[in-house]
Amino acid sequence: MRSSFQTFSLRTLLPAAASLLLGSCDLLEFSPNDHRAPDSERDLTAKNLALLAQRPLPAGDTLRFVFTGDSQRFYDDAEDLVKSVNQQPGIQFMLVAGDISDFGFAREMRWVNDDLRKLKVPYLTVVGNHDLVGNGRKAYEAIFGPRNYSFVYADTKFIFVDTNGREYNFDGTAPDMAFVKRELADNSVRRHVIISHVPPQDEDFDPALPEQYTQALREDPRLVFELNGHRHSFSIGEPFNDGVTYINSSSFESRQYVILTVWGDKQFRLKKVTF
């Protein structure tokens, strides 16, 4: 093949290559680390939040959303998950607790979006440690958006926090405690919910920050619960015996998700769904 290829002249090859490159970035990728994507597959967080804004929940109504995580390597299960979620009544949106990809490739993130965009409700993500591998940080920010962000819906502030300390060599920047404290200080809403990937009791959480992080959560009178992924299995409890509930999601591979229903100040119930 090499000798056959070398018989072509550059004059013959360059126009054809230029046509391919200019025609569509989907036809040819320079490397797996290429984070380019069509406009329709960029800034998905902002686009999903815009969709959510078109579906306001009347004051006092019960808030209900789906929580899952870790789609990495389990892309074949995403289609079945979407079909199941679309059958659930009264769902406002879905949260995905990180590790959308396995190797931080933009292509992986776009594969997952190919299925999740078929949901009848918007979906929001938090960045996972696998989403930061290689060129993953640029890919995640291009396709989804900021690694730390928040939004308010149904008198509840949802706070998404990058807690993947190991991916920053435990340099004290993840989680961004200034961001966490500022968001939790917001008393203009009734409730707070925090979503991150790595839970604070995990070895991949920056070992210098669990005490600050858990203290900030413990001292917030509006916090309903903290949501995590990373461990690929469901759990719920108070690991620090401080009154703060931590809920860990199953992975797509587990073919299970939860529906969280929230009302009042901090009341909630949880339902597991197998698909």
Image (cartoon, helix red, strand yellow):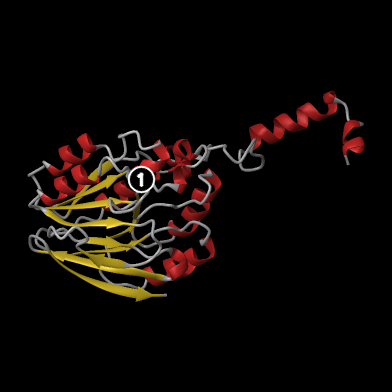
In the rendered image, the quadrant that contains the C terminus is bottom left
Apparent side of residue 63 relative to residue 188 in the rendered image (left or right)? right
| Residue at screen point 38% across, 60% down | 231
Find residue 64 and report its image quarter: bottom left
**Which residue lies most toward the bottom here?**
274
* Nearer to us in this view, 116 or 219: 219
Residue 176's spot in the image, x, y percent? 27, 37
Q: Nearer the viewer, residue 199 or 153?
A: 199
Looking at the rendered structure, the kind of residue marked 1 is Thr
Where is 207 relative to 22, above or below?
below
Q: Find residue 209 and report its image quarter.
A: top left
Q: Name, please, the residue furthest toward the top.
A: 11
Using the rendered image of the protein, determine whether residue 155 is visible from the camera's viewpoint: yes
Judged from the image, the secondary structure of the residue bearing numbered disc 1 is helix
Report how many numbered discs are placed on residues in the image: 1
Q: Residues within 10 Å of mark 1 (few under 14, many from 20)?
A: many
Q: Quadrant of residue 137?
A: top left
Q: Which residue is mark 1?
A: 45
Residue drawn at x 35%, y 40% as measured from the top left: 147
Is residue 148 toward the left or the right of residue 252 in the image?
left
* Residue 62 is at least partly visible in this image: no
Q: Nearer the viewer, residue 43 or 140?
A: 140
Q: Residue at x 39, y 56 (%)?
A: 230
In percent of width and height, residue 211 lies at 20, 45
Quarter of the picture containing the N terminus is: top right
Residue 29, position in %: x, y? 64, 39
Q: Is residue 21 left or right of residue 66?
A: right
Residue 6 place in picture, x, y as percent: 89, 31
Query: Taking 42 as reference, is 94 left or right?
Result: left
